[in-house]
Image (tube, rainbow, N blue to C red):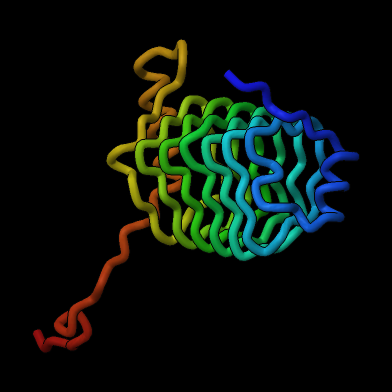
Amino acid sequence: MEEKKKINQVRFEELRSKGFPKGCLDHCYLDGIIIEKLPEEFQISHSRLSECWIQKFSADSLKLSNCVLADCILQGLSIDEMKIMDGTMDGTLLSGNTVGKMDFTGMSMRHSSMRDCAIESLVMEDTALDGMYFFRTQPKYLRGEESMRVTLGGATEEEVENYRRCVKGEIIPPKKEFKTLGDNICRKG
């Protein structure tokens, strides 16, 4: 197993001053970094982000693939398409973000939460949720609900069922009711 390059705040700022060369944050260990600007379209893969703050910027696309996010905060972001896929999220907070399409395909999300986020479309295909909570975050569209694995490690079956209800109640969009023409016609009795 290859050792990951260690990136601290000073090294991160050096890479930013160089315009973030392609792949510069792949296969890295990012520790305690405050990220307040990335290019409009940016990707990080096979890296570990520990105690990082990704905050307060806008972008077209941010993709974190096969990454571990441990004790991170993602807040105040405005991103058209955010993909956090095929990795692990543990102890991480997503708060106050506005995202067009958010894709968590293949993620294992533990002891984390998403709150006060505006999301147009949420993809949860093959996602494992264990103690992942959602507050005031209901997407307009949800895909992958059938393949989500919603568990609560060490809990009783009743606690797990309650947790599932809470999660689904927060992220499953309400069913839209469509009125037919007949509903609008006044009938004489």
Q: Nearer the viewer, residue 134 or 1?
A: 1
Q: Position of residue 135 (x, y in %)?
A: 57, 43
Q: Which residue extends farthest right? A: 10
Residue 125's quadrant in the figure? top left
Circle count = 0
The structure residue drawn at horizontal position 57% and vertical position 18%, both measured from the top left corner, is 1
The structure residue drawn at horizontal position 11% and vertical position 88%, both measured from the top left corner, is 188
- In the rendered view, tell whether residue 114 sits above or below residue 111: below
- In the rendered view, tell whether residue 180 sits above or below residue 137: below
Q: Position of residue 173 (x, y in %)?
A: 39, 55
- In the rendered view, tell whether residue 59 sits above or below residue 137: below
Q: Which residue extends farthest left? A: 189
Q: Nearer the viewer, residue 115 or 5?
A: 5
Name the quadrant of the C terminus.
Answer: bottom left
Q: Nearer the viewer, residue 29 or 109?
A: 29
Q: Position of residue 145 (x, y in %)?
A: 33, 44
Instruction: Indicate left or right for 179 with 95 as reference.
Output: left
The structure residue drawn at horizontal position 41% and vertical position 50%, both measured from the top left corner, is 123
Instruction: Indicate left or right for 159 with 28 as reference.
Output: left
